[in-house]
Image (cartoon, coloured by chain):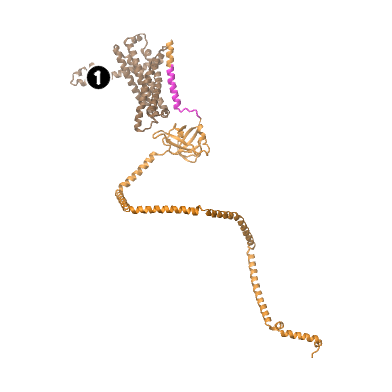
Amino acid sequence: MSEELTPTQEAPSSFFWGNVSALGATAIELVVGARELYSVFVRTLYYVVRGRREKGVLLRQMYEIGNKSVFFLTVTMGALGMILVYQAGLQAARVVPDYQMLGATYLQLLIRDLAASLGSLMLATRVGAGIAAEIGSMVVTEQVDALRMCAADPIDFLIVPRFLASMIMTTVLVIWAGFVAFLAGAATAYFAFDVMPQTFFNARMVTSADFATGFAKCIAYGAAIPIVSGYCGLSTFGGSEGVGWATTRAVVNTSLAIIILNFFISSASFVIFAG
Amino acid sequence: MAQERSIEVKVGILILVSFGILGAFVLVMGGLNFEKTYPVFVDFDNPGGLQSGAPVKIAGVKVGKVQQLEFRGGQIDPKTGRRTLVRVKCAIEARVRDSIHDDADFYVTTQGVLGEQFLAIEPGSNTKPVLAENSVLKGIDPPRLDLFLAKGYELLDTTMAGIRNNRELISDIAVNTAGLLKGLNNVVSDNRDRINRTVANVEELSTEANALTREARAKYVNNPKIDRTIENVDRISADLQRDTGPLLRDAKEALANLSRASATIGGEAEQAKVKKALDDIVQLAARANATAADAQAIVTHIKTGKGTVGALLMDEQVYDDVQEMVRDLKHNPWKFLWKE
């Protein structure tokens, strides 16, 4: 396509046309990327149903994604919980110096959104980067090509176990992350604003709609992380530099995917459960 | 293999812990309560922002929750005979059943200034019976802050308008009041000495009155004589009270007698008869009087010696003549037959 645009480069406004061509190239790249991502997703779903299962692979992936992320998530979500409650308390003190509903609103927010979104963002940085680096280096070292030669689809062999493990372990880790964030928030509320833990632990604002939304987000993010980062890994080119790029792209795109999904799921939940 | 096993255990533990947290939270959120509850219905005209699931509290302690809010649209409930707009069904824990009585008050109130609303129970008095299951009560509606604000705003508006429209009048009043106060101040400061004197006099007077009162009390109130008098009066009144009974009984009896007598006479025929008899008696008495007068006249007549009987009784000469004649006859009996 760029060859077709070459005659216009000699025009007086070559700078303008250059920008336009860059925009067009980006758009085409995006469309192609989205189509490939979609194809990876569909093939993953296909192999989840039809694929061959190698024993112990799923478990190892669950261990890699789940157990090895517990410490990281506990630290980050604990810190985030403390910061969130502390800032919310300071803001609340400006409006009404009444902290009775601090815990209830915080818990609702956690279950509906923050535990899943923030937890998955944290997870995406660690798990997504790991998946992209692993698959990317396999692409670079032509292991993936070897798989293809053995008539084994790398998606079935590499992505499906990570996909399943990630969906399960993201849900598990988000529950854990929410728990930690809430405990950290309760401790902050007690030490910073003298809110008793029994006052803070107020589940009255939480409805089953919040639970459904949170659970939907867990599943969606859990599915998005391995697919987006796996796609980034599979589309690696070049040497070790390409692996680095693939890792970066994986983290960026996974985070972006989580935020976009968050927007759509929150909107859908707002429509379905009428606020 | 051992490593595989340890991975399995670790993954299993993480999943178990996570779902354990989730399960525990769901149980807590569902307000899982193993206490038995009993339903009570409370009618409201406007329960404010009360929601189903809101807690029911006695003295700030949670004892149940609001299960359902039913809009009844002001229909007359045949059970209570009241128009009910909203009926709140609440489940109250059975452990507090004995402390809620028939006259308990149910009202909607809030936690803190902007907190959520809940149903509070004022348990009522211990003398009343315990509130029965499925009872329907009338709740106290929460204060309508919006209404209060609306009315308050109107009041404020009216006041402001009044002030604005009567600005001159109000300023006149203020000026006059200020002048009055100034004049009063002048009067007070000019007559300070006199006022002081007056106050001193009043004080003296009150002191005297005080002394007087004390004296009067000593003399008239704390005096034993008075006590005695009162005692006597008391006794007399007691006697009187004691005697009044029999006295009244006697009087009653006399009255009854009288009543009986009058009843006997009662009839008109009897009354006429009695009247007639009385008339006769009067006539008789008049006649007797006349007869007595006649007799008196006769006696007077006789006394003066008039008439035959008078002469016989009153004239000595007649007696002498008769004596002489009798004596003469005794001596000369023939004279009966023969005249000399």
Task: Point out the image quarter for the C terminus of chain A.
Answer: top left
Q: Which residue position is annotated with label 1? A: A22
Task: Point out the image quarter for the N terminus of chain A.
Answer: top left
Please state the horizontal and vertical placement of residue B199, each as a whole percent of the image: 37, 52
Query: What secondary structure do most residues of the magenta stretch adopt?
Result: helix
* Residue at the image point whose x is 76% and y is 84% from the top: B323
Quadrant hosting residue A86:
top left
Chain B colour? orange
Give neighbour class at mark 1: few <14, some 14-19, many 20+ (Cα, 10 Å).
few
Please state the horizontal and vertical placement of residue B59, each as a whole percent of the image: 46, 35
Please state the horizontal and vertical placement of residue B178, each as a whole percent of the image: 30, 50
Q: Is residue B340 left or right of residue B308?
A: right
- Which sits in the foreground, A100 or B73? A100
B26 in magenta: yes
- Which sits in the foreground, B324 or B305? B324
Quadrant hosting residue A151:
top left
Badge 1: chain ID: A
Residue A267 in sight = no
Chain A colour? brown
Residue A87 in sight = yes
- Which sits in the foreground, B2 or A59? B2
B30 in magenta: yes
Q: Residue furthest bottom?
A: B340
Please state the horizontal and vertical placement of residue B142, each as a whole percent of the image: 42, 38
Q: Residue furthest left?
A: A12
Q: Is residue A16 left or right of residue A137?
A: left
Amino acid at the residue labelled 1: Ala
Location of residue B19 with respect to B332 vertically, above or below: above
Secondary structure of residue under mark 1: helix
Which range of residues does the magenta coloring cover? Answer: B12-35
